[in-house]
Amino acid sequence: MIVIVTLSNIKASILEDVLAKLLENSGYTLITKATIENKKLYPEFCTRGNGLNILGRGGIHQADALGQFPITIPFNYPVRLFLEAKYFKKSKKVGIDVVRSAVGILADLNTSYQTVQLEGEDLLVQRYTYKFAIFSVSGFSLNAIRLAVANQITMIDLSGSEFSTLIQAIDNISVAIEKNLKNIPSVTWSKIRSGLQEKLFSATSKDMETESNSLIESEFVESFISFIEGYGDLYLAAVDSPFSILLKPTNPEQFKHFLMDHPKSTFSVKIKWDQEKKDLWQVRIEEYEKIAFSFYLPSILKDYIFKDSNVVKRSINAKNTYLGNMVFYVKNAERFIIFKYAQSNL
């Protein structure tokens, strides 16, 4: 069967892999085929076509980008996160159909465990809680947001200007790859994507086709990998509301050194917004204001704050009520970081 790969598919797949890479220091570890070779440890996976496939209660689900977090909190199974990226045109927001699909996958996977007839080692096999995060370069419809909030689906909007250089780099390499796919029919997108993943995650491949390998080793791919390596970390942070935010440090290396010099986990922060871009906000650590992060307000929070002339009161309430605690994990520091909004700085 001939699989037709569109430019939009290529862009979305590369964005998924790039996000997995950028979220590495946030504790997100990409699960690959090599990870699941031990069938006894990972009986929930099966081999079927390309990519990872997970057995649910009523179906088999392909996971293009599936990651696992290293820390498990009490009263919960280890968390695995489906990372799905949508690369639509700017005028087309991600709709409710995408969220509905995610809801169905999670329902099937998180209710797939049947233990009545299990004994011994079979009963001791590790179980997991599956979560879903959808990233979009064009935003989300209101109905999609409502369904996502109701079903604990994380939605991250990448349409802001802070991510424009990242999106442009993905645009450029995707166009180049599509061109090569047309010119070299023997090279498949699956092989090229595997090669890119190996480059991104510093792995090596023993079975790459010669033509695929020559493309992966090309100058434009090397330039793209260098750009991603220099882009810095992204941190997926939980806040006091039913959504997450994506924190982008102004200087990632400076933040890493800061954590080495300051072993505590909780820091008081100031939160302000950009006067020219009201959805772009900044977090600065009190007493260490050189350590700064940017993030975009989820659209429903932006609408709440700026819906009328009472902006100051609403923004103060939002900082205290919805953004008062930002919690994220830093892998290289091996600890959770908590940003607490300093209410005295209004």
Image (spheres, grey):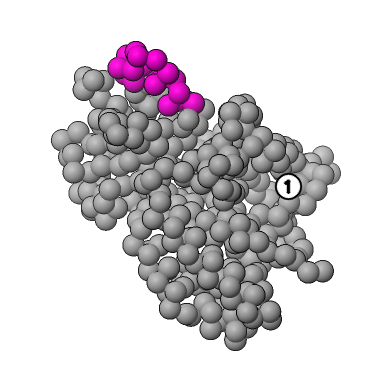
Q: Quadrant of the N terminus?
A: bottom right
Front residue of 84 and 218: 218
Q: Position of residue 120 (x, y in %)?
A: 75, 50
Front residue of 342 and 304: 304
Residue drawn 79% across the image and 44% down it: 57
Q: Secondary structure at mark 1?
A: helix
Q: Which residues are magenta?
A: 300-317
Magenta span contains residue 309 = yes
Q: Establish if 195 lies above or below 288.
A: below
Front residue of 205 and 129: 205
15 left or right of 44 in image? left
Q: Amino acid at mark 1?
A: Leu
Q: Establish if 206 lies above or below 11.
A: below
Identify residue for label 1: 123
Q: Establish if 43 lies above or below 152.
A: below
Identify the image quadrant of residue 77: top right
Residue drawn 39% across the image and 55% down it: 165
Magenta span contains residue 261 = no
Q: Position of residue 132 (x, y in %)?
A: 60, 42
Q: Establish if 289 lies above or below 323.
A: below
Q: Residue furthest left?
A: 287
Residue drawn 76% across the image and 47% down it: 56
